[in-house]
């Protein structure tokens, strides 16, 4: 995304908006043009994180000649995220609309994972293990009781357990655990494997990768027409999908009126290894609110244990700090004291793409030819299947499926207008 914007070269817009072709038979995108520049594609996806990749994969499956621009496809927040598919345990007050989309995506996961495994030939580390959210003191317990009531009012499945019942399920839990919520429907996937599989599936589906930064959006006759890369290459397309994660608001050339209101929300995450002699250390995701901060422990089948995550509003800062690591280990240790025996293998920070209402921005903008797939904040991994489907629908029809309609980028335009002084 933009660092030092270059002026865009003069360029003709692609002849026509992307037309839907026969599914399964995409024509090649970006075949070199006469002057050695890549030829136009139907769809150009800006950003190669899991959201950009799933959009490109689904677009190519629909028969669009699809290209994707990113210096390192498969990188980004997916390299840090724990991969909880936590529609129920991450429910928050005021986010009931988002809950509908989260649940729709969670329901799609088994089929999505099977299809992607088949299409990529890769294992995704999809583990249907469930989640246990526990409380360590009276305040946490009261909070968890409130969450349970909200889940019940929302028709979600979760079961209240005593501390003893929690420890029967997970013997490594601290003796002081005061109770918990068993949610058998909140699973996990390994986001690094998911990203790798999406890159492979895109390659097999004919998506053309341009390994470069997108520097500037090209707008020709009031229509998004492509991007210019950091090395000065002009990529043109009938439709452009901006899927740049936390960087989505920084692409030069995007008119202010449609610039996504996305900000980076830093999360520090630790990775530990569970030696054979301790296995199974935990059999499901375990999480808690400790003194107001969320901590979660996600055990992979391969012995990795992911501990997350801080939530910090510090701009584009991905420094791992002693304080962040200390707080995560301190809280994880209160929850599962045996964690201090495990080798610490990695510390890393990533950036969630936050929006004003914590929900994603999906589909067409007011600039013809420009669509958004960004702003997934805490739920990017969970929302990957439903985002791919919604964007493929939007690219083919110009509209959104009913479940995605509340997440149109235009909702913030409407809010800005009503906030105008009389
Ligand atoms: N969904 C977990 C996190 O954002 O930390």
Image (tube, rainbow, N blue to C red):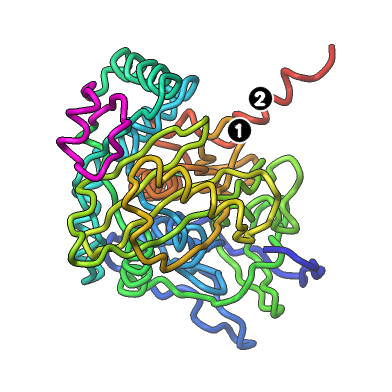
Spot occupied by residue 87 in the image (x, y as percentages of width and height): 34, 34
Residue 358 sits above or below residue 109 on the image: above
Q: Which residues are magenta?
A: 158-182
Q: In the picture provided, is 331 more to the left or to the right than 111?
A: right
- Residue in view at x 50 percent, y 58 percent: 77
Q: Quadrant of residue 78?
A: bottom left
Query: Mark 1 to mark 2: distance in Å?
Result: 6 Å
**In which quadrant is the N terminus drawn?**
bottom right
Q: In the picture provided, is 218 more to the left or to the right than 69?
A: right
Q: Which residue is mark 1?
A: 410
Residue at the outermost left position: 168
Q: In the picture provided, is 70 more to the left or to the right than 1?
A: left
Q: Which residue is mark 2?
A: 414
- How crowded pointer 2 is (Cα within 10 Å; few <14, some 14-19, many 20+) is rated as few
Spot occupied by residue 92 in the image (x, y as percentages of width and height): 45, 25
Q: In the picture provided, is 57 more to the left or to the right than 155?
A: right
- Residue in view at x 43 percent, y 58 percent: 50
Any magenta on residue 302? no
- Circles 1 and 2, Cβ within 8 Å, touching? The answer is yes
Q: Please name whichever residue, 19 or 122, is drawn nearer the observer in this view of the structure.
A: 122
**SS of the residue at dot 2?**
helix
Spot occupied by residue 378 in the image (x, y as percentages of width and height): 48, 42
**SS of the residue at dot 1?**
helix
């Amino acid at each position: 995304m933009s660092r030092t914007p270059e002026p865009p070269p003069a360029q003709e817009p692609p002849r026509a908006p992307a037309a839907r072709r026969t599914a399964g038979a995409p024509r090649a995108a970006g075949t070199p043009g006469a002057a050695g520049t890549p030829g136009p594609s139907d769809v150009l996806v800006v950003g190669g994180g899991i959201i950009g990749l799933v959009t490109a994969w689904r677009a190519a499956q629909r028969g669009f000649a699809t290209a994707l621009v990113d210096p390192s496809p498969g990188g980004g927040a997916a390299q840090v995220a724990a991969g909880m598919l936590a529609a129920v345990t991450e429910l928050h007050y005021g986010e009931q609309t988002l809950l509908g989309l989260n649940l729709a995506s969670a329901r799609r996961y088994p089929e999505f994972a099977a299809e992607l495994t088949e299409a990529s030939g890769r294992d995704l580390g999809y583990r249907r293990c469930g989640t246990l959210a526990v409380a360590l003191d009276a305040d946490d317990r009261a909070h968890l009781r409130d969450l349970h009531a909200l889940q019940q009012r929302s028709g979600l499945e979760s079961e209240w357990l005593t501390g003893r019942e929690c420890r029967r399920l997970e013997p490594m839990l601290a003796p002081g655990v005061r109770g918990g919520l068993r949610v058998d429907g909140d699973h996990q996937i390994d986001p690094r494997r998911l990203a790798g599989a999406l890159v492979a599936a895109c390659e097999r589906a004919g998506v053309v990768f341009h390994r470069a930064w997108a520097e500037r959006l090209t707008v020709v006759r009031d229509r998004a027409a492509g991007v210019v890369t950091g090395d000065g290459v002009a990529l043109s397309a009938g439709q452009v999908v901006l899927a740049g994660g936390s960087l989505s608001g920084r692409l030069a050339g995007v008119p202010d009126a449609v610039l996504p209101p996305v900000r980076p929300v830093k999360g520090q995450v630790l990775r530990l290894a569970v030696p054979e002699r301790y296995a199974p250390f935990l059999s499901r995701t375990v999480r808690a609110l400790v003194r107001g901060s969320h901590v979660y422990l996600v055990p992979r089948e391969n012995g990795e244990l992911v501990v997350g995550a801080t939530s910090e509003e510090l701009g584009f800062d991905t420094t791992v700090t002693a304080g962040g690591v200390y707080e995560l280990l301190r809280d994880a240790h209160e929850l599962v004291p045996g964690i201090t025996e495990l080798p610490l293998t990695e510390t890393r920070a990533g950036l969630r793409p936050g929006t004003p209402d914590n929900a994603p921005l999906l589909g067409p903008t007011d600039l013809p030819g420009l669509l958004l797939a960004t702003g997934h904040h805490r739920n990017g991994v969970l929302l990957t299947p439903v985002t791919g489907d919604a964007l493929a629908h939007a690219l083919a029809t110009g509209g959104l499926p009913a479940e995605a309609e509340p997440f149109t980028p235009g909702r913030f335009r409407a809010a800005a207008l009503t906030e105008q002084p009389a």
